[in-house]
Amino acid sequence: MSPLLLFSFVIGYFLLLLGVAWYTSKNANNDSFFIGNRSSNWMLVAFGMVGTSLSGVTFVSVPGTVGSAGFQYFQVVIGYFFGYLAVAYILLPLYYKMNLTSIYNYLEHRFGNTSYKTGAIFFILSRTLGATARMYLVINILQIFILDNMGVSFWTTTIIILVLILLYTFEGGVKTIVYTDTLQTTCMLLGLIVCIVAIMGKMDIGFTESIGLLNDKGMLKMFNTDAQSSGFFIKQIIGGAFITIAMTGLDQEMMQKNISVRTLKDSQKNVMTLSVILLVVNFLFLLMGGLLYLYAANNGVAAKGDDLFPTIALDNHLSVAVGMIFILGLISALFPSADGALTALTSSYCIDILGLKRNNKLNESQKKRTRLMVHFSFTIIFFLCVIAFKWINDKSIIDVILKVAGYTYGPLLGLFAFGIFTKRSINDKLSLLVCIIAPLLVIGLDIVNNADWFVHKLSLTGNFANSIKTLSDKVFHGFKIGIELLIVNGLFTYIGLYLISKPAVKTN
């Protein structure tokens, strides 16, 4: 497949995004950038958030998991649904009642300035790492299959993509992203469905027959009943629920779009609509993965995991048109997570760290200039992080970064849970210390629990490596902590906050 043709297709898609951005950013101001003037259409937000929730990692990695785990990922997706219920009916009413622009303002009202800044810092750290890791995965695929053949370097590709994202988010912010995310989600789902139909056609099978073949191969297995396993279905469902609560309900990027909707009722409709759509879409990604493995087995394709989907789509196994639609779907999965993250990080830093919204010494023009400088600065940080991932050049870097994201969202989970479910007051100045200690304890627990994995990754040898493995066997007896690590992190934070708290003072 011609790299030049694919590259031309990518450029055409960017030009379309820039056109949408130009149209939607007319008469935009700081409120447009931060919360879309609270006038976003809930249906557009719900549909566009599908792309933000999935990202390029889902587009490539979820189909790749089917070969080793079947449809077990759907256990987590079921948990997502219950998590969205909590977001819609516990967190959103709180945010709308307080009329928040940044959700971390809640921590300031509840605990004080240190807790407020702590929440914002943990969000900025986690979202920066997560977003740039996802960018690295997709940019690397574009590099391998298109741009290496054109003699374009990886760092040049990264700069071009970041500049294009910067251009269409620079003015409109959330107001623009609501529309560009809708366009990109449409393209991503189109790419998914077309690829499913194309592979079924290539193998000359229908939906019913494909389900039968997957069942015969044991790939349809959905529920893991091994209580010792990290993939045990109860842990996966509960863990999935808390991932949604933390990484959607306590995430400024995701909530920034929700609170841009005019009313609480419409925002709740948005969240619940999103939860149902994600059930269907994730099932289709798993079906896609099963079909890819069936095709690979029948045609001698050696690729697996993250490499499977792009290899079959772009290495002349399918038509040129399908390859182009795959690229369209891939970049459409990338940009809703990258552009939203860039906008949310700018908003959080300006509002939470700089206090821009409440600064009466600066006029609207000066605030806009500051916001644009911050936006540009985060673009540079994104570039440096993507290049760092390329330098590390580890195929498992995505798993590592997602694990780190679990570490950093734990303190947010603990802070918000303690604020909502207790009336106790804390020593605000010590909250940052608690939120640092809790992830460190969780990292230590995770190292002991997954001793073999960490010994291999860190190339540990000798008595120290043996001691960690022995300790793991004695403490856990083969039990594996999985997705629930986030919950443990939040629990440690909650306990730490309780230790630095006292009963609320009653007033008449």
Image (tube, rainbow, N blue to C red):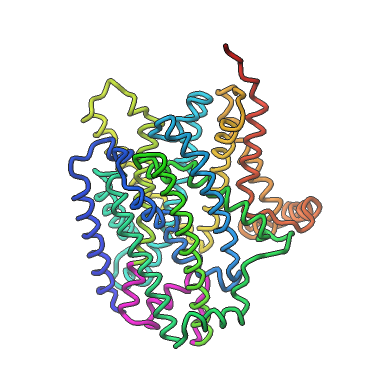
Picture residue at 54% right of the left edge, 54% below the top: 80
In the rendered image, the residue lying farthest to the top is 508
Residue 159 is situated, as x and y percent measured from the top left of the image, at 30, 55
The quadrant of the image that shows the N terminus is bottom left
Q: Residue 308 magenta-drawn?
A: yes
Picture residue at 47% right of the left edge, 71% below the top: 307
Q: Is residue 65 above or below residue 200?
A: above
Dominant secondary structure, magenta: helix
In-front residue for pair 318/460: 318
In-front residue for pair 182/271: 271
Picture residue at 32% right of the left edge, 47% below the top: 41
Q: Is residue 497 above or below residue 241?
A: above
Where does the magenta region start and end? 299-328
In-front residue for pair 447/240: 240
The quadrant of the image that shows the C terminus is top right
Residue 137 is situated, as x and y percent measured from the top left of the image, at 43, 61
Q: In this view, does 352 lie above or below 335?
A: above
On screen, residue 323 versus residue 481, left or right, reads: left
Image quadrant assignment for residue 354: top left
Image quadrant assignment for residue 187: bottom left
Number of marks: 0
Residue 309 is situated, as x and y percent measured from the top left of the image, at 45, 73
On screen, residue 183 versus residue 213, left or right, reads: left
Residue 420 is situated, as x and y percent measured from the top left of the image, at 56, 32
In the rendered image, the residue lying farthest to the front is 265
In-front residue for pair 416/270: 270
In the rendered image, the residue lying farthest to the right is 474
Q: Residue 10 magenta-drawn?
A: no
